[in-house]
Image (cartoon, rainbow, N blue to C red):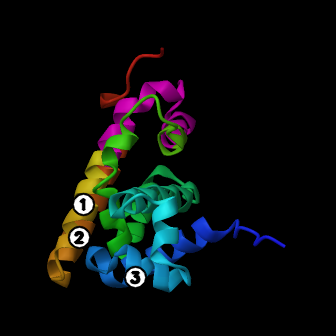
Amino acid sequence: MPPHPDLQLEEKILKAAQRLWRTRGAAGLTLRAVAKEAGTTTPTVYKRFRNKEALRVALAHRCREQLNEFLFGSRSLDDVCRRYLQFAEEHRHEYELLLHSWSDVFQPDRPQPGKQWLMGKFAERFGGEASQYARNFYMLVIFSHGAATLLSLSDDENARKDVRENFLSLCDILIQNTHLFRGKAN
């Protein structure tokens, strides 16, 4: 009887890669280490991911999906800001992956569930059409990403506390002034 292909192998490889990235960062992500962690061979990993960069891109997409899922649990726009920083701080190494895949977020021909969801949250709170809140979306994403990046660069808890507090205070002000960024209906 011929061997049956392991249909869950790619998922095992991605989970192994994510565990390695989470604990060791970029330095720990080698295809050989991933193969060992996943209980397979290096050539098998290469069959699914042509190189380390392809694996890192797949991990970045997975991280973005996890971030979106975490944010989708937000109760309010204010909570979105808090949860964004929480995710970035609790998943520091994984958040670094997003640095390599942000251009995907801004390409209109790709699915953007996070963007659609957040613009919908603005429309729920302030009225109008979700499409009117594209600038509000970009404002929060760029601002949140900047704060998350600053938090990931420092181990000084006083500096981190300062960034966190100022970010949340400024988010409240930006959300309260949504009308300044709201666009016209399409």
Mark earlier in primary sequence (2, 3): 3
Circle 2 sits in a helix, a strand or a loop, which is it? helix
* Mark 2 Cα-neighbour bin, 10 Å: few <14, some 14–19, many ≥20: many
Front residue of 83 and 24? 24
* Mark 1 Cα-neighbour bin, 10 Å: few <14, some 14–19, many ≥20: many
* For residue 184, side relative to residue 1 (left or right): left
Q: Residue at x 56, y 55 (%)?
A: 72
| CA distance separating discs 1 and 2 | 6 Å
* For residue 126, side relative to residue 52 (left or right): right
Chain part drawn in magenta: 118-141
Q: Which quadrant does the N terminus fall into? A: bottom right
Q: Which residue is farthest front? A: 1
Q: Quadrant of residue 96?
A: bottom left
Going by the numbered disc 1, the residue's amino acid type is Ala
Vertical order, 49 against 113 (above or below): below
Query: For mark 3, what is the residue?
Result: 33
* Mark 3 Cα-neighbour bin, 10 Å: few <14, some 14–19, many ≥20: some
Question: Mainly helix, strand or loop, the magenta region?
Answer: helix
Q: Quadrant of residue 57?
A: bottom left
Going by the numbered disc 3, the residue's amino acid type is Ala
Q: Position of residue 78 (x, y in %)?
A: 43, 55
Going by the numbered disc 2, the residue's amino acid type is Leu
Q: Position of residue 129 (x, y in %)?
A: 54, 24
Give the numbered dot on residue 151: 2
Q: Quadrant of residue 138?
A: top left
Circle 3 sits in a helix, a strand or a loop, which is it? helix
| CA distance separating discs 3 and 1 | 32 Å
Query: For mark 1, what is the residue?
Result: 147
Mark earlier in primary sequence (3, 1): 3
Q: Is residue 78 visible?
A: yes
Q: Residue at x 33, y 73 (%)?
A: 93
Q: Residue at x 38, y 69 (%)?
A: 94
